[in-house]
Image (cartoon, grey):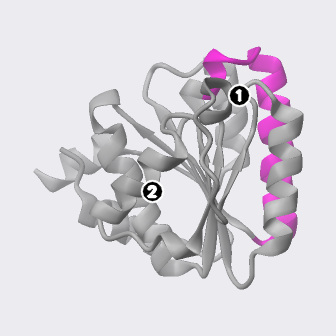
């Protein structure tokens, strides 16, 4: 089980504008995501969720059940459009699928312009996005997104599954991040 308090404490200690790669196991991914979004919302005025794992309607339902303020969130849904399951709402933008990297990048730029105050970007699954993209192309995409975040002082958190992410892409991402946190190490610290 993820030590949500320890994870939240670690995330709250980070300096403004930090970008974190958070590695977790598949059975802890959901819990890790919830704790991460909650911690990011506590530090920021608004944020973008790039969702490759859950469609918008399901994500909003889960956030509301977990008392996460959805009014401060804007979702970039990479799932629903390809399944003809998009729902009209003010805080969502649909992209065809997780391989439409140019459209994802353009959407992030557009959404960032419309958000006020301190902002964050949360990518719920590097691992899922890699299933739909060539590793080299995806690494270039992430490099571009993370550079834009740095230039705009936007905080970021990217989740990937431990030992399931392409090693070259992981190395590229890790060097661009301020810190890599492994939830398996948080568990050991708890015991």
Rendering coords of residue 61 (x, y %): 37, 55
- Per the rendered image, the range of residues in magenta is 129-153
Name which quarter of the figure residue 119 lies in: bottom right
Mark 1 secondary-structure assignment: loop
Residue ID at (24%, 48%): 2
Residue ID at (48%, 38%): 54
In this view, the residue in front, 123 or 7, is: 123
Mark 2 secondary-structure assignment: helix
Residue ID at (76%, 14%): 134
Magenta highlight on residue 106: no
Residue 18 visible in the current orientation: no
Would you call the spot at circle 2 few (<14 residues within 10 Å), some (14-19), or many (20 or more)?
A: some
Tell which circle, 2 or 1, labels the residue nearer the N-terminal end.
2
The residue carrying mark 2 is 60
The residue carrying mark 1 is 97
In the depicted structure, whether residue 100 falls above or below residue 151: above
User: How far apart are the two marked residues, 2 and 1, measured between alpha carbons?
Assistant: 19 Å
Q: Main secondary structure of the magenta part?
A: helix
In the depicted structure, whether residue 23 falls above or below residue 8: above
Residue 114 relative to residue 28: left or right: right
Rendering coords of residue 76 (x, y %): 67, 49
Residue 94 visible in the current orientation: yes
Quadrant, the N terminus = top left
Magenta highlight on residue 151: yes
């Amino acid at each position: 089980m993820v030590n949500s308090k320890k994870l939240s404490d670690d995330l709250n200690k980070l300096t403004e504008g930090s970008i974190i790669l958070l590695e977790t196991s598949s059975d802890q991914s959901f819990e890790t995501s919830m704790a991460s979004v909650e911690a990011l919302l506590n530090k920021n005025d608004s944020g973008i969720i790039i969702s490759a794992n859950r469609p918008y309607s399901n994500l909003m339902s889960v956030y509301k059940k977990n008392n996460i303020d959805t009014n401060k969130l804007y979702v970039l849904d990479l799932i629903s459009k390809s399944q003809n399951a998009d729902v009209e709402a003010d805080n969502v933008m649909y992209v065809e699928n997780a391989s439409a990297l140019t459209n994802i990048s353009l959407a992030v730029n557009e959404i960032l312009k419309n958000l006020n105050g301190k902002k964050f970007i949360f990518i719920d699954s590097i691992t899922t996005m890699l299933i739909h993209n060539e590793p080299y192309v995806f690494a270039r995409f992430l490099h571009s997104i993370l550079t834009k975040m740095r230039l705009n002082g936007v905080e970021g958190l990217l989740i990937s599954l431990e030992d399931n992410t392409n090693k070259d892409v992981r190395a590229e991402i890790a060097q661009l991040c301020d810190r890599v946190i492994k939830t398996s190490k948080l568990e050991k610290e708890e015991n």
